[in-house]
Image (cartoon, helix red, strand yellow):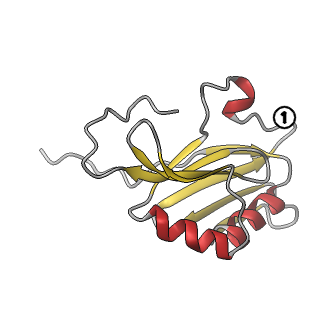
Amino acid sequence: MTRPILNGIAPFFIVRNAAAAVAFYRDRLGFDCIYQGPEDDPFFAIVCRDAAMLMVKAVEANPAPNPTRDPAARWDAYINVPDPDALATEFTSRGVMFSVPLKDTSDGLRGFELKDADGYVLFFGRPRENSNRDTTDHA
């Protein structure tokens, strides 16, 4: 029996303003908005870049990024990228500020962190080559 394919997974972020969130991901991080609705007053959107996708929705609750609830849960999303150095260069050219600069981490990863418009922390990176460390407990 063939195993069914999973195409991906997408974080679902509660945001203050869906249009502002879309603008951040589109203009600063190079994502495309593939859906925004409803048409008359959009409060929900899906943005993607390559295989990375996330959803944002403005509701009556305030955003609650993981680090605001527990500093040990530092990331809200891990985005695996084959070349974090090149992506860091692109984001720098777009004026993106990193909350943690590009570096090799103590847990066997190479990458950088940034915060979106609502304070969600995104890590863009990959396991370091020749790293024998277990990278499952990193955030």
Front in this rendered view, residue 115 or 30: 115
Q: Residue at x 34, y 50 (%)?
A: 128
Q: Where residue 94 sits in the image (x, y, percent)?
A: 69, 74
Q: Where residue 80 sits in the image (x, y, percent)?
A: 44, 54
Instruction: Report the quarter where the N terminus lies.
Output: top left
Quarter assignment of residue 133:
top left
Q: Is residue 87 visible?
A: yes
Q: In the image, is 79 to the left or to the right of 71?
A: left
Q: Is residue 32 visible?
A: no
Front in this rendered view, residue 71 or 8: 71
Whether 90 is drawn above or below 66: the answer is below
Neighbourhood count class around disc 1 (C-alpha, 10 Å): few under 14, some 14–19, many 20 upward: few
Front in this rendered view, residue 11 or 101: 101
Q: Residue at x 76, y 34 (%)?
A: 64
Type of the residue with mark 1 = Ala
Total count of labels:
1
Q: Where residue 124 sits in the image (x, y, percent)?
A: 52, 54
Front in this rendered view, residue 84 or 79: 84
Q: Residue at x 58, y 74 (%)?
A: 90
Q: Where residue 3 sits in the image (x, y, percent)?
A: 20, 45
Whether 37 is drawn above or below 5: the answer is below
Whether 103 is drawn above or below 66: the answer is below
**Would you name the residue on which mark 1 appears?**
61
Quarter assignment of residue 22:
bottom right
Identify the secondary structure beneath mark 1. loop
Question: Seen from this angle, which residue lies furthest left?
Answer: 1
Q: Residue at x 79, y 61 (%)?
A: 38
Quarter assignment of residue 89:
bottom right
